[in-house]
């Protein structure tokens, strides 16, 4: 089982500290979403893990070894950092064949990943004719080429069309279900919520959260019940009688904070209040993320004032 281990990792560029004493572990068998505002240090951390940059202090290892010490690294760690990196004059297939040859990976694997990433029909076209989405797919194909147990993707959904977004979601889930270690950075919260089991969140180079996704949301967003009725007066009086503060919204919905669907449903039914819709409002990753990063911004402002 191969984990990514980041231990007290710090990276400074001049006076700018991009990564600040960061410690976390990315475990196999699940998709870990890597989140944080622009400039939080996600790409720098990924580059440090891949040995593309040297840490100022601390360490980053894969399966207990620094990337540079892994023989045939493409067979162990697959990464997509920058989809523009492929040589535009080569065909997609040749780009992958060159990579494969340097790691003694057979050409048939090239054709396999081309098919798997939906690039079969354009495999013999030059990369410079590819759309951003096709380049993303080519970058993902390159990451998968060595059938690695560790996969790191920086913004893989970038430029993908809706069908591509569904494809990447399914792919990430499958890779994790196969027991691989999958780390994926994204700015798209709905997207991340659809594939991640676990989250690592950075803010200004520091670790803000390292937690299962459900716990991350539940700790920050109060659960509520959404309800719609044809008799708002009866609904309000029933809820008030039972100590619930309901909030009415312009679109005809009511929200009952800190309540469970079972309880509100039972109360309404016992009081004969007609219910048109009833649902648990469990909170979204976006709400929880904005709550966390807002708190972080406030903290930063307070520190500056002090
Ligand atoms: N080569 C470099 N030289 C100088 N500063 C750098 C370099 N690479 C990154 N930085 C700085 O380090 C900080 C972290 O950048 P990084 O790209 O890792 O953030 P990120 O979380 O990936 O952001 P984004 O979400 O915008 O991609 C930023 O302030 C950035 O300007």
Image: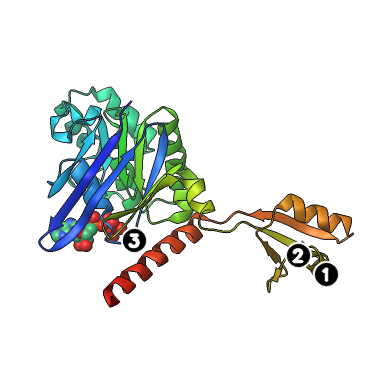
Pointer 1: what residue? 237
Image depth: mark 1 or mark 2 in front: 2
Ligand 1 has an atom within 8 Å of the beta carbon of the residue at disc 3: yes
Q: In the picture shown, does residue 295 fall above or below 202?
A: below
Pointer 2: what residue? 243
The quarter in which the N terminus is drawn is: top left
- Front residue of 47 and 264: 264
- Tell me what residue is drawn at x 20 percent, y 35 percent: 94
Q: Residue furthest front?
A: 306
- Distance from Cα at disc 3 to Cα at disc 1: 44 Å
Pointer 3: what residue? 37
- Front residue of 273 and 150: 273
What is the secondary structure assignment of the residue under circle 3?
Answer: loop
Which quarter of the picture shows residue 228? bottom right
What is the secondary structure assignment of the residue under circle 2?
Answer: loop
Which quarter of the picture shows residue 101? top left
- Tell me what residue is drawn at x 73 percent, y 64 percent: 244
| Of callouts 3 and 1, the N-terminal one | 3
Q: Is residue 162 visible?
A: no
Ligand 1 has an atom within 8 Å of the beta carbon of the residue at disc 2: no
- Distance from Cα at disc 3 to Cα at disc 2: 39 Å
């Amino acid at each position: 089982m191969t984990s990514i281990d980041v231990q007290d990792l710090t990276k400074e560029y001049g006076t700018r500290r991009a990564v600040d004493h960061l410690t976390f572990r990315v475990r196999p068998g699940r998709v870990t979403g890597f989140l944080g505002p622009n400039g939080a240090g996600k790409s720098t951390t990924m580059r440090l893990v891949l040995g593309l940059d040297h840490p100022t202090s601390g360490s980053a290892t894969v399966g207990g070894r620094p990337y540079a010490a892994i023989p045939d690294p493409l067979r162990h760690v697959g990464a997509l950092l920058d989809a523009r990196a492929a040589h535009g004059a080569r065909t997609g297939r040749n780009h992958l064949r060159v990579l494969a040859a340097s790691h003694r990976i057979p050409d048939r694997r090239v054709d396999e990943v081309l098919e798997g990433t939906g690039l079969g029909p354009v495999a013999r076209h030059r990369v410079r004719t590819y759309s951003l989405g096709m380049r993303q797919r080519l970058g993902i194909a390159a990451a998968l080429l060595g059938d690695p147990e560790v996969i790191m993707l920086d913004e893989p959904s970038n430029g993908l069309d809706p069908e591509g977004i569904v494809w990447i979601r399914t792919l990430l889930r499958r890779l994790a279900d196969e027991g691989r270690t999958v780390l994926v950075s994204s700015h798209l919260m709905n997207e991340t919520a659809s594939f991640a089991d676990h989250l690592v969140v950075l803010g200004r180079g520091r670790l803000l959260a390292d937690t299962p996704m459900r716990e991350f949301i539940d700790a920050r967003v109060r659960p509520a019940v959404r309800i719609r009725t044809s008799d708002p007066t009866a609904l309000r009086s029933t809820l008030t009688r039972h100590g619930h503060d309901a909030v009415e919204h312009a679109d005809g919905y009511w929200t009952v904070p800190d309540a469970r669907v079972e309880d509100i449903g039972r109360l309404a039914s016992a009081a004969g209040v007609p219910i048109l819709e009833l649902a648990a409002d469990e909170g979204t990753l976006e709400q929880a993320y904005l709550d966390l990063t807002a708190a972080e911004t406030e903290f930063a402002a307070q520190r500056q004032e002090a």
